[in-house]
Image (cartoon, coloured by chain):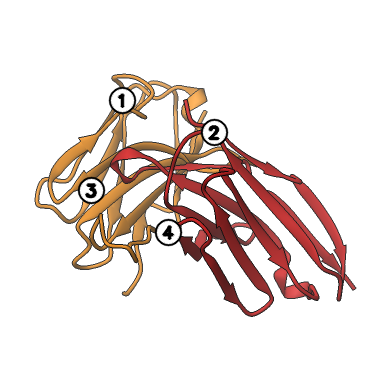
Amino acid sequence: GAGVSQSPRYKVTKRGQDVALRCDPISGHVSLYWYRQALGQGPEFLTYFNYEAQQDKSGLPNDRFSAERPEGSISTLTIQRTEQRDSAMYRCASSLQPGLNTDTQYFGPGTRLTVL
Amino acid sequence: ELKVEQNPLFLSMQEGKNYTIYCNYSTTSDRLYWYRQDPGKSLESLFVLLSNGAVKQEGRLMASLDTKARLSTLHITAAVHDLSATYFCAVEVYGNKLVFGAGTILRVKS
């Protein structure tokens, strides 16, 4: 289990339902990032944490989106009252230590969210 | 707002040929990443470029960074089919967040 893992890998939900997406970072990684990737595009930043502290949530599209990382490890991205425009691949990444010259963000496999 | 532009967006190459992918960005940054993504897969880190003039090479791929010109290049030497993938550059901004380009789809034909 060396990599970033995400669950579920696929989620189909009906408009108006809430969904929770989980990310399990690489063990010992300080930083955790959430991105959203539309088909044919590069990932777009949503939010990130150092340990349990949310450092930047400027990329969250609106207040239906929230994220937490209560114990500084696993993180959950929650989307309330989902809309069809929320359909996308949601990717999580983690990095060992921000500020290190060699620090790199390692991406998980993503959760494909489809809102009907 | 930081903009990251890649070109070309699609590249069809013959095996054995050389080509370069360009990544321009609009604001100051000292850290630039190149990622590879295979269809239906996650992003794989290829290079992290940390300073002006940085050059890194791995196999048939070589990446360079010119922070003054706000330009990075990914050079492909003697392409092989296994290099077919989508390549993204990403610029790190304040708070360690990455801003990605739209990606370059590379297809290497036999």
Compared with A108, A2 (above or below) is below
At label 2, counting other C-alpha atoms closer than 10 Å, the crowd grade (few under 14, some 14-19, many 20 or more) is some
Which one of the lettered chains is coloured red? B
| SS for dot 3 | strand
Whether tag 4 and tag 1 are in contact, CB under 8 A, the answer is: no
Whether tag 3 and tag 2 are in contact, CB under 8 A, the answer is: no
Q: Estimate the spatial distance between the alpha carbons at disc 4 and disc 1, rounded to whole Å.
A: 39 Å
Which one of the lettered chains is coloured orange? A
Compared with B44, B22 (above or below) is above
| SS for dot 2 | loop
Q: Viewed as shown, does residue B61 lie left or right of A10? A: right
Residue B23: percent from the left, percent from the top? Answer: 63, 47
| SS for dot 4 | loop
* Mark 2 lies on residue: B26
* Mark 1 lies on residue: A80
Whether tag 1 and tag 3 are in contact, CB under 8 A, the answer is: no
* Mark 4 lies on residue: B50
Q: Amino acid at mark 3?
A: Ser
Q: Amino acid at mark 1?
A: Gln
In which quadrant will I find the C terminus of chain B? bottom right
Compared with A86, B52 (above or below) is below
Q: Which residue is painted at 72% across and 52% down in the image?
A: B105
Q: Which residue is painted at 43% across and 52% down in the image?
A: B31
Q: Estimate the spatial distance between the alpha carbons at disc 1 and disc 3, rounded to whole Å.
A: 16 Å
Residue B13: percent from the left, percent from the top? Answer: 86, 63
At label 4, counting other C-alpha atoms closer than 10 Å, the crowd grade (few under 14, some 14-19, many 20 or more) is some
Q: Amino acid at mark 4?
A: Leu
| SS for dot 1 | loop
